[in-house]
Image (spheres, rainbow, N blue to C red):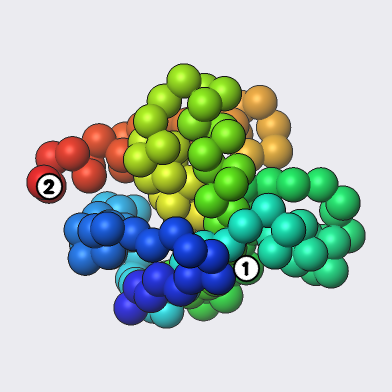
Amino acid sequence: MIDFNYETEFTLENESAISNWISNVIKSEGKKEGEINYIFCDDEYLLEINKEHLQHDYYTDIISFDYTVGNEINGDMFISIERVIENAQDFKVTFEEELKRVLVHGVLHYCDYKDKSEEDVLLMRSKEDEKIAMFHVEQ
């Protein structure tokens, strides 16, 4: 089950379409959907989580807590809408595209994709592009 929670004034306009897309991404990776929570927040909210849980004192767009058991994907993903807006501007893409990238990025981590090495980052970006394209196909 995919749930969307809001700790900021932002809300998704298309929760069901996003939820269906994420479900299909999980299936496409041969995984089973468990409990997945997206929590949309602002920079300061996410900064506190970053400091408290990861001992990092910097802004980020997403922090995910992976509770996956075996093949069943479970987790909580905190997303700073302020970072997504800024990253979209920096990368010269729409807010919607950058948001999809961040939404799917967390799920791909739960599917065992990493982004620490240069090689891992290239694979992660390729997977993000592949999964974002799935969203367009289904509309």
Residue 113 percent location from the top left of the image = 53, 47
Callout 1: few (<14), some (14-19), or many (20+) C-alpha neighbours within 10 Å? some
Residue 130 percent location from the top left of the image = 31, 35
Q: In this figure, which residue is indicated by the disc labeled 1?
A: 65
First along the sequence among labels 2 and 1: 1
Give the residue type at disc 1: Phe
Number of numbered labels in the structure image: 2
Instruction: From the viewer's perspective, tell me whether residue 59 is left or right of residue 8.
Output: right
Q: What number is the disc on residue 138?
A: 2
Tell me the SS state at disc 2.
helix
Residue 28 percent location from the top left of the image = 27, 53
Instruction: From the viewer's perspective, tell me whether residue 113 is left or right of residue 61.
Output: left
Tell me the SS state at disc 1.
strand
Residue 60 percent location from the top left of the image = 69, 47
Give the residue type at disc 2: Glu
What is the quadrant of residue 134 in the picture? Answer: top left
- Viewer-proximal residue, 42 or 64? 42
The answer to whether residue 109 is seen in the rendering is no
Q: Residue shown at 55%/70% (left/top)?
A: 7
